[in-house]
């Protein structure tokens, strides 16, 4: 009974936790107040809250896929259609904003509980839970920033609006948007605290460990263009955990060939409902599909041939072994790609080749594998970026990659779609790359909307 009452109480709090004044009601003051180390662990072990329903607006807007007119007209809701066509209209679905801030609330609540425990707060278990809390908060902040804040540029980051940084469990203080620079400083700071407190290994699925925190740092530093640090932390993550699946051992004829919680997963996280990008709705871009060579096992592992529309393909390579959500977590395969890209950019060509070849050896037919030997960085970097797109397809990385790569004239790309005979375009470096905040957050939460 105590657990049931506690669960109900926490659920009530979470409803009101996305930002102050989002709803006017207050949580039930008669609920059981969490106060023990076990209570803190209970909050952080809530897989549904902490590991699922991360924002997917950005991926809906990418160039990885398209949809049939039947799907666009008959399946997709208004917000999905607007995101897909870059139509700059108000968004009303608050869930993709609210759910990450539930993660933040749980993390802050756990930290607050542990800080009041006295001597018990110095235990190894408390130390690990503090690391978990900081990791979850960093990951949630990072997911929100990649979708709702603009691309990161060193010279403008202090002036650009970032995201609200809720750092304690209180719900009465008003929310404000920190600068983009401050937002990423907090993300990096939280990951570093996590790296110093998380264990080397973790047997409970869904919980982060030290390599997870290093991977989060590598992802963050790559996004903000600090390639020295991106290389360092990708390498640190791989030194801690470097396993890769050998695609030669997977069964390509399976409906979903990639195992859930496989050896590559450093942190399991999935998006909110994939909607237009689900297996039965999202059609893989034909040019992207054709870029996979015949000896590339991903061509059979990742893609399912559709009966309708003819000559189209769905994506079945989901790392959560799911049809209706995108895996957006951290993996060793991503870390090999971060290390390879960062290494090229800082002149470590041999290290870049070792990283990319280590990955590709596990993705290509063993009997036809040929290592990459290109040493010209102007040729190698585009190759690594193409492999990044091909490997991390439908993994929550493309939107942030488009944003950061658009800052480099060599990789700028205008996106174009034709839907029902109408052409839609998203120019590179458009302000639309920072998604509109949901209207309830702006009108009720009193947060400033993104600039246009």
Image: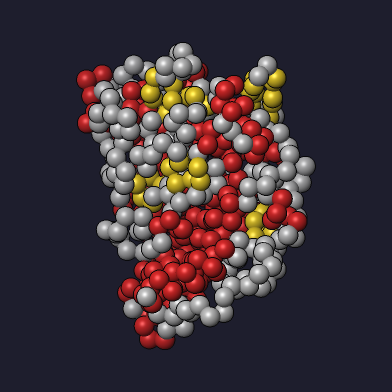
Does residue 156 appear anywhere in the picture?
A: no
User: In which image quadrant can residue 370 be found?
Assistant: top left
338 displayed left or right of 66? left
Badge count: 0
Q: Nearer the viewer, residue 94 or 333?
A: 94
Quarter of the picture holding the C terminus: top right
Residue 39 placement (x, y as % from top left): 40, 74
Residue 123, image x, y percentages: 33, 78
Q: Is residue 76 visible?
A: yes
Q: Position of residue 138 (x, y in %)?
A: 51, 58
Nearer to the camera, 234 or 114: 114
**Depth check, front residue: 367 or 177:** 177
Which residue appears at 37% of the width and 32% of the height?
317
Picture layout, residue 385 above or below residue 295: below
**Position in image of residue 324 (x %, y %):** 45, 38
Q: In the visual, does 236 lie left or right of 308?
A: left
- Write the residue at 44% across / 21% down: 313
User: In the displayed structure, would residue 159 be above or below residue 8?
Assistant: above
Query: In the image, what residue occupies the spot 50% across and 33% down?
Result: 277
Extreme top residue here?
Answer: 310
Image-based side of 133 in relation to 86, left or right: left
Q: Where on the picture, by quarter, is residue 350?
A: top left
**What color scheme is it?**
secondary structure
Looking at this view, name the residue that lies furthest to the right: 452
**Residue at image x 57%, y 23%?**
70
- Furthest-front residue in view? 1
| The N terminus lies in quadrant | bottom left
């Amino acid at each position: 009974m105590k657990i049931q009452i506690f669960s109900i109480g926490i659920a009530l709090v979470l409803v009101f936790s996305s930002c102050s004044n989002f709803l006017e009601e207050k949580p039930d003051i008669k609920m059981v107040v969490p106060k023990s180390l076990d209570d803190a662990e209970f909050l952080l072990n809530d897989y549904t809250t902490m590991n699922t329903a991360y924002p997917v607006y950005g991926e809906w807007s990418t160039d990885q896929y398209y949809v049939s007119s039947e799907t666009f007209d008959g399946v997709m809701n208004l917000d999905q259609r607007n995101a897909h066509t870059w139509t700059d209209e108000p968004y009303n679905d608050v869930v993709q904003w609210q759910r990450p801030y539930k993660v933040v609330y749980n993390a802050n609540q756990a930290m607050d509980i542990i800080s009041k425990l006295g001597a018990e707060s110095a235990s190894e278990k408390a130390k690990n839970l503090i690391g978990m809390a900081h990791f979850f908060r960093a990951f949630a902040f990072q997911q929100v920033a990649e979708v709702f804040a603009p691309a990161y540029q060193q010279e403008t980051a202090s002036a650009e609006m970032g995201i609200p940084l809720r750092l304690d469990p209180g719900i009465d203080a008003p929310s404000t948007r920190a600068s983009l620079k401050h937002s990423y400083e907090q993300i990096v700071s939280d990951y570093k605290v996590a790296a110093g407190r998380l264990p080397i290994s973790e047997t409970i699925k869904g919980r982060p460990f030290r390599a997870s925190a290093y991977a989060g740092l590598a992802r963050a530093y790559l996004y903000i263009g600090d390639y020295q640090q991106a290389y360092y932390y990708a390498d640190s993550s791989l030194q801690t955990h470097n396993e890769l699946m050998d695609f030669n051992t997977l069964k390509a004829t399976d409906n979903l060939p990639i195992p859930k919680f496989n050896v590559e997963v450093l942190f399991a996280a999935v998006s909110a409902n994939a909607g237009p990008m689900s297996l039965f709705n999202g059609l893989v871009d034909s040019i992207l599909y054709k870029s996979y060579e015949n000896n590339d096992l991903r061509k059979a592992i990742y893609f399912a041939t559709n009966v309708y529309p003819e000559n189209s393909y769905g994506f079945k390579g989901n790392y959560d072994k799911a049809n209706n959500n995108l895996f957006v977590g951290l993996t060793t395969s991503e870390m090999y790609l971060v290390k390879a890209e960062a290494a090229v950019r800082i002149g470590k060509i041999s290290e870049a080749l070792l990283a990319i070849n280590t990955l590709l050896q596990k993705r290509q037919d063993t009997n036809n594998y040929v290592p990459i030997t290109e040493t010209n960085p102007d040729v190698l970097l585009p190759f690594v970026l193409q492999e990044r797109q091909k490997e991390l397809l439908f993994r929550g990385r493309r939107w942030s990659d488009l944003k950061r790569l658009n800052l480099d004239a060599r990789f700028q790309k205008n996106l174009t779609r034709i839907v029902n005979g109408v052409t839609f375009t998203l120019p590179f470096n458009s302000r639309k790359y920072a998604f509109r905040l949901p209207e309830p957050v702006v009108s009720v939460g009193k947060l400033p909307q993104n600039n246009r």
